[in-house]
Amino acid sequence: MISFENDYIAGAHPLVLNHLVETNLESLSGYGQDIYCENAKAKIKNACGRQDVEVELLTGGTQTNQVVISTMLQDHEGVIAADTGHINVHEAGAIEYTGHKVLSLPHKEGKLQPEVLKKYLEGFYADETYTHMVFPGMVYISHPTEYGTLYTLKDLTQLSDICRAFRIPLYLDGARLAYGLMSRETDVTLPDIARLCDVFYIGGTKVGALCGEAVVFTRQNKPAHFITSVKKRGALLAKGRLTGVQFDALFSNDLYFEIGRHAIRMAEKLKTVFHDKGIPFYLESPTNQQFIILDNAQMERLRRQVCYSFWEKYDDKRTVVRFVTSWSTTEEDLQKLEDIL
Amino acid sequence: MISFENDYIAGAHPLVLNHLVETNLESLSGYGQDIYCENAKAKIKNACGRQDVEVELLTGGTQTNQVVISTMLQDHEGVIAADTGHINVHEAGAIEYTGHKVLSLPHKEGKLQPEVLKKYLEGFYADETYTHMVFPGMVYISHPTEYGTLYTLKDLTQLSDICRAFRIPLYLDGARLAYGLMSRETDVTLPDIARLCDVFYIGGTKVGALCGEAVVFTRQNKPAHFITSVKKRGALLAKGRLTGVQFDALFSNDLYFEIGRHAIRMAEKLKTVFHDKGIPFYLESPTNQQFIILDNAQMERLRRQVCYSFWEKYDDKRTVVRFVTSWSTTEEDLQKLEDIL
Amino acid sequence: MISFENDYIAGAHPLVLNHLVETNLESLSGYGQDIYCENAKAKIKNACGRQDVEVELLTGGTQTNQVVISTMLQDHEGVIAADTGHINVHEAGAIEYTGHKVLSLPHKEGKLQPEVLKKYLEGFYADETYTHMVFPGMVYISHPTEYGTLYTLKDLTQLSDICRAFRIPLYLDGARLAYGLMSRETDVTLPDIARLCDVFYIGGTKVGALCGEAVVFTRQNKPAHFITSVKKRGALLAKGRLTGVQFDALFSNDLYFEIGRHAIRMAEKLKTVFHDKGIPFYLESPTNQQFIILDNAQMERLRRQVCYSFWEKYDDKRTVVRFVTSWSTTEEDLQKLEDIL
Amino acid sequence: MISFENDYIAGAHPLVLNHLVETNLESLSGYGQDIYCENAKAKIKNACGRQDVEVELLTGGTQTNQVVISTMLQDHEGVIAADTGHINVHEAGAIEYTGHKVLSLPHKEGKLQPEVLKKYLEGFYADETYTHMVFPGMVYISHPTEYGTLYTLKDLTQLSDICRAFRIPLYLDGARLAYGLMSRETDVTLPDIARLCDVFYIGGTKVGALCGEAVVFTRQNKPAHFITSVKKRGALLAKGRLTGVQFDALFSNDLYFEIGRHAIRMAEKLKTVFHDKGIPFYLESPTNQQFIILDNAQMERLRRQVCYSFWEKYDDKRTVVRFVTSWSTTEEDLQKLEDIL
């Protein structure tokens, strides 16, 4: 059975796992106060091309969104997101759990449109009753989005400009950031993100780590007493080394980017396979997630030999399904898929 | 200056105020354990035509929505509302403050459509990822809606049937209930609401009280230890008599309904004035709120002599404004308005 | 039946009620934007001897504590209180509901001792693990305390000095403030409180209002967007006039202080009655609450003719009960009590 | 430098790490739906001697306490703990963050005394004002406690009886459970805990895992929709295998208990070293944590060669420090310590 179910089906990338093994017996302080956390942070700063950013390591994506958003919002504020945004749909209300509303706006292929955002913000303050409403206090975007799509440098620049005009932070969820940065169709670099966003996270779980996400605060804006707020949310690992060692490996010798590059290569081949077989796309993305349309009989047959994800019903006879590549996808997997199809 | 700004511009209806005055010196127990709270509850049960409902008195509308919704939802659940619903827009995130998401659906003239609701609920459980999503745990509607519109008995019956099929409570926000019940275009009675809804509230603040809303639980479903949960939310009045005495007056001699009837009479005359003057309606409602379109110059002139509410921009030259009647609106007010127009 | 059960058994002081009646038909803006709220705030500033304080009106005591504490604390902070403090015992967890811990310290007759506070604060920062603990972010005291006792000017000055040294606000819960200010055994004035505390509230509910508490921020420290935070907590009255008119009356012609003076006079006579009858005190307070010890048979007999509050068991045969005076206590009530005893 | 700083200074026990390595490349479903999570749960059930318990895996101790307590309490309830309890002191207010109060009671060597608990519960319901107070809704104990002390079977039985009489769950925090179960001075077994507690957790992080705690619900009382509540709290690992594989290893071939046995053996030798050197104990525990008193000069000298934890000041000249053993403590470490002393 081959699997394109998602990008977290395997354990850790071998180089990441190996670093855990080789450092395993060292005595280290807890709670992120160890040399590997320090190294990881330093290497991430270098990758961002900025020594003045602040880096913090957390364990999972929903947790990271919850911690970052709830510690950066003021009491009267909520966070703006595309209505398809992960925080608005697939995090079980984790943001609302912290007492803050997700203010959802219409999306286009998973993306928040700068003009839609601007109109919303202007309209908010033009409404005479706004003191009775949740203030827009942050903008959340995911890059790649939940549909595998990407913002262009122009998009990001416009979003950033709007956020700065309204003095609210722009937050980028980079759960799959490597796949965005290494896409063949992007003009956005990690330093661009560090320059245009006020805070973002570099996803580890979906890019070769067992767990772990690295938050980057770019404007000396890390909330005061952040470690206590993290602890208060049950999000502080005793063995902080677990994430430190993994990010130290991911940001050594360009591994993070290499993982992205490999998955993109596999995704391009995957697209070719579908095209060659005449299978229609629902959304052909520039990253590691591809959405195709299968008729239901075909889908059932395939299910016996290949793992993939249900996405949504297309119509009564057809279904949208998602195929995902990652560091663990092999040429052999693709060959098998081609043979099966 | 005459005012049609809203239905809470005046103090209490004279009969309500008088009851406060005549009972003022009595020594009564606190926290709602007094004879007037008891009387009010008994009279409300009678008005509902049901002795088995449970009635609780609270102070304001947002508070009531917050208390009812947060005590009735389970941890994993959110509340469905029309995207124009008061809890989704004008309560500053009071529901999210309690850790629960408002799941918004498209509206039609402020109303949640039964077929939209049904499709959403079916779609939710058909989505394979639903355990990662906020479960629909309650349906919130307002009646009259924020646009002054009303559900028909058929609408309410359908919504109720859907809720019961999915085993979630239907909750009706009756901040302006009197104006809905006494509309000339409604086929819905208070006993209908008590039969079809699982919980609802009868608004006092906007219907002649200084403050106060009466929550009715219709299926022996009042949350256990409700008074402690109310206290925990800062919503328990020490002098519970304040709401008890007022609702005792409102539900004596049909006063609540009489207030509704009067405001509707005034609203019908108001509509005639606008029609006679050829002023276009944005939404001509069957209740006490009317939405008209004024060109901006006209609007500014009017502002000097009449109070009304800004609603929204219609286009660059025209604005939607709201006129509201209440127990305190007089024939004289209407005459003056006509003269001014 | 005469009642000394508490200081909120009656409705409003006649002058307060009268002001509600005389202003009832005026058309006023909602949400506290009316002339009576404005007048009330101006008069309170005068009473504090300070024009630079900020005043906000809320509805009840628990609500006020919840709103003030949760909007002033930072995420990583909790509020210090005597273990007998109202927020620690009798508010059903209203502070914790907002996500913040009450850090309780031992009391002495209901009072937080300056030296206990200082030792705690020094110890907190001396503990190497403090980043894993809830930071002390505010000090809560009640004056009079739950036992009717009072801080001296020296106590308050010391508490204030400690708070300022540790840069945390001192918050005084003045639910019964009038009875403290008018005590014959106090050296503390309202201007003293406005000078030494960073925020406090002047209780209305227990001092002649139907409801209402006035919060005073003394150091330009009112949280930003306070009205939105109030709304978010379900605490914003639509008819803000209800509290505005009442405080306007309470702070006209010294009424607030006169109510305090009267209740103290009644309390002094009450104490004399108990002394004369040889009834032992559990705590003889300088304010309007008196705690006496009754043997259980005596208590049961008395219960048929007089209302008072159970406080706690003293031993198997005796019980501590509380007698309270207020604006509505009369010489006649005291005479009757004396006759009964 | 040798370290006795705590029981999470090293990575994973080699057998745990090895299991991660050998399963690393397998394609597995996410979110705990994999064969290793299944195996781990089955093995834990066996170790508990009960097939009818429900097991769930989480990541860290504070997170586990937060998830378990907040999903099991009702709205009006709080959790009772010894005032030294981890949730009351060292979790940065993680319980209060979920809206629930920790009701603290005096401890004796870190333990909650059955008679103190019983008196508190009886007193609560005897207080006429209890509806205004936080209801006791759960009892939290840690075993071993924060002081390394242990409840006897008799203690646990009494606590369990009291909890069942008052119909509230008894919850045992077993962050260091292996060290309690393998103590030479205990009469409590894992099946005893599964029988007497309503819910408890088996700590992994401090017993040889990189992360991970296993919650056991013993009375078919796992909260409904638990996985959604876990997700909502940001506590659901995408790669659930990370905890599944580790607990699968820990509960294979008695590894969990063997780790406990080893650490106890090391602790016994450690105690002998201190006794031989005439170093006074602050608290000589039957588990893997030992508290000794060092004079400050001695402490500073030692610090250069040995890691240990500051506990608290004993007096101006002496300090209490903590030494901890674990699976990674070696005979060689002890020999070095002896030589240094």
Image (cartoon, coloured by chain):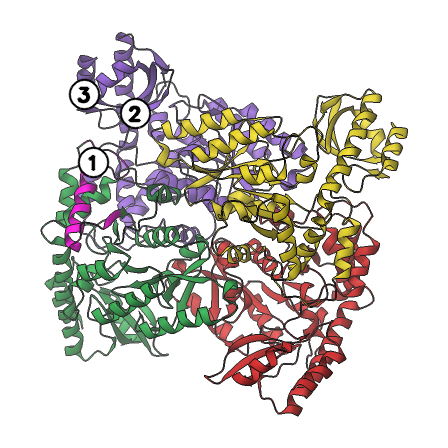
Chain colours: A green, B red, C yellow, D purple
The amino acid type of the residue labelled 1 equals Leu
Helix, strand or loop for disc 3: loop
Residue B126 occupies which quadrant of the picture? bottom left
Q: CA distance from mark 3 to mark 2?
A: 13 Å
Q: Which residues are magenta?
A: A27-56
Magenta residue check for A29: yes
Secondary structure at numbered mark 2: strand
In this rendering, the answer to whether B175 lies above or below B31 is below
Q: Residues within 10 Å of mark 1 (few under 14, many from 20)?
A: some
Q: Are marks 2 and 1 on the same chain?
A: yes
Rendering coords of residue D319 (x, y %): 34, 17
Residue A146 part of the magenta segment = no
- Which one is in front in this view, the residue at disc 2 or the one at disc 1? 2
The dot on residue D309 is 2
- Upstream in sequence: badge 2 or badge 1: 1
Mark with earlier residue (3, 1) = 1
Residue D143 horizontal/vertical position (percent): 41, 28
Pointer 2 local density, CA inside 10 Å: few below 14, some 14–19, many at least 20: some
Picture coordinates of residue C159, whole percent (x, y): 52, 31
Q: Which residue is mark 1?
A: D15
- Image quadrant of residue D3? top left
Name the side, left or right, on which C165 lies relative to A37: right
Front residue (pair B171, D201): B171
Q: Residues within 10 Å of mark 3 (few under 14, many from 20)?
A: some
What label does residue B326 carry, if any? none
* Residue A284 appears in the picture as rendered: yes
- Residue C323 spot, x, y in % from top left: 76, 32
Residue placed at 17% from the left, 53% from the top?
A: A50
Determine which residue is flagged by label 3.
D305
